Image (cartoon, rainbow, N blue to C red):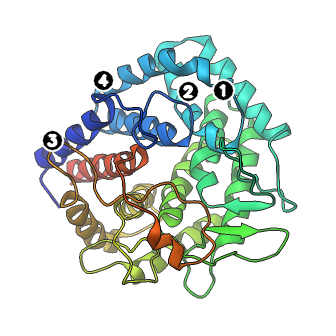
Amino acid sequence: MKGKNELSELAERVYHRMVDKMSSDWGMNIDSWDWVPGVGVISILAYGQLMNNHEATEYLLQWTVRNKHMSEQVNVINSMAPYAIFPDLYRMSGERWYLETAITIGDWMLTEAPRTREGAFEHTVTENVHFSEQVWADTLFMAVLFLARLAKLTGDRKYAIEAEFQLLVHLRLLQDAPTGVLFHGWNCAEKNHMSSARWTRANAWVILASPWIVEEIGSTTPFSDEIVERYQQLASGLRHYQGKDGMWSTVMDQPEFYAETSGSAGIAAGWLAGMRLGWLDDSYKEAVDLTVQGVIERIDRDGTALGVSGGTPVMPSISAYEEIPCIPTLYGQGLVLILLSLANAEWSSL
């Protein structure tokens, strides 16, 4: 593991790359309202809390003031992501708007958000395209994490019960029993995993979101042991596909595909989150350290996380995943920032 000072300095560089350079590019435009800036602000919150960086948490209050006018434009699953910071911003500021907005959005998710026939949230997006009856791994991080945090803030079990159900149904529908890892998506109408891609970033969203969700709802409602069992199967399965450089290919069972930074960072961060919760033992430390080193080697001098694949729907074939170009993105920066922050916290606890 890198030293504490080096991890802290790298994390600061990655953070400032996100907030200092204004950009209108889809991947780096933080002043917008969708899943891309959503993952960005979620990661900045984690960084601020884990690194005790008040500048970062203050930035989020300012970010919300600048961008809240866009939050009412559309309600889809992908645009839920920024709301995940609202419970903590309410605790920090005491401003009722954060609480009232979060409750309104949480109630929309419970009563109006489209669902598949299994009751899972249908993966809806801001773009003018529909994925009817499709369940995507991304949803757990983009939407269910917010519900779990709202449950802890309000103490209202209805949000916790829904978060627990969504986590479990997503795991059941997406997990590949022979390998333990996840497919990118599931088509409820056709009863198949579509292209059946074991996409790395899909696994990253889930391995990280699962312990975070349970940590939030655990004091509000009981959760199924099946969640922990499936998480541990996933964590173990991911070790099988880790490369010697600590990274995973963009489709993990296709080692000839390019190594993908955001998914690799998210997986190692998910392992660390599971270790903090007591779901994983210390045998994962060596694998985490290997990924941290691999990710660090892919951080440019200006803090840009390199090797991050662009926006990726469930592709029509496995080969199509390798055709997705790599570009700088807030979610790439964000998953790297979360990994560095968690690794720094792990170093501090030794």
Q: Quadrant of the N terminus?
A: bottom left
Q: Which quadrant would residue 158 be assigned to in this image?
A: top right
Residue to which mark 4 is pinned = 54
Q: Which labelled disc corresponds to residue 102? A: 1
Q: Which quadrant would residue 273 be assigned to in this image?
A: bottom left
Residue 118, given in percent of the width and then of the height, sits at 84, 62
The three-letter code of the residue at mark 1 reads: Ala
The residue at 72%/69% (across/down) is: 186
The residue at 36%/19% (across/down) is: 58
First in sequence: mark 1 or mark 3?
A: 3
First in sequence: mark 4 or mark 1?
A: 4
Q: Which quadrant would residue 284 be assigned to in this image?
A: bottom left
Residue to which mark 3 is pinned = 9
Residue to which mark 2 is pinned = 86
The residue at 57%/76% (across/down) is: 197
Depth check, front residue: 213 or 77? 77
Instruction: Specify whether residue 217 is in view.
Output: no
The residue at 36%/32% (across/down) is: 23
